Image (spheres, grey):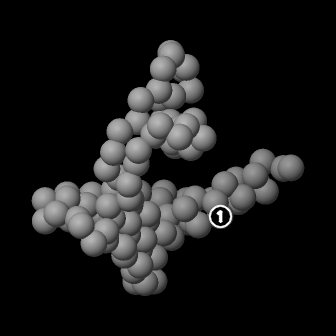
Amino acid sequence: MSTFKQAMSNLANAVQDLSKLDVITFEGSVTLEGSDPELVRFSDVMAKAKDNTTVKVKVLASTQTSIDGDIVAFYDTNITDAQRLAHADLVQAGAESRKATIDFVKSIVGDIADL
């Protein structure tokens, strides 16, 4: 694949990734034995824990926002006010981070367009 095609593919993937924000708040405990160097990312930990029947994890809240304004939210019926507020703070932080990334990409695209 040419460098230009690869760059366009990477840009399309980045735009798709920026179009949605997913925040999931878990409660529980995950204990993994060993010193596997791959267990430094949460997604890796959860993948390893998935088949472990001793792992106890519960989804307390989940929010997905789309760039077009659509929002899907789930709250466990037993979520506490503190947990709900913590989740809302995480959603806000994620939205701010996504906005900063979009603004950064727009500034780069603007700089390239000015060439």
Q: Is residue 92 something one can see in this rendering?
A: no
Q: Residue at x 25, y 61 (%)?
A: 87
Residue 11 position in % (x across, y down): 63, 59
The residue furthest left is: 82
Q: Secondary structure at mark 1?
A: helix
Q: Residue at x 33, y 56 (%)?
A: 25
Foreground pick, 75 / 24: 75
The residue furthest right is: 1
How packed is label 1: few (under 14 Cα within 10 Å), some, or many (20 or more)? few
Q: Residue at x 43, y 84 (%)?
A: 70
Horizontal placement of 69 versus 115: left or right? left
Question: Residue flagged by tag 1: what amino acid is it?
Answer: Ala
Foreground pick, 69 / 56: 56
Relative to 4, residue 30 above or below:
above
Q: Is residue 41 something one can see in this rendering?
A: yes
Q: Residue at x 38, y 54 (%)?
A: 58
Horizontal placement of 87 versus 30: left or right? left
Residue 77 position in % (x across, y down): 27, 72
Identify the residue under disc 1: 12
Can you tell which quarter of the image residue 28 is in? top left
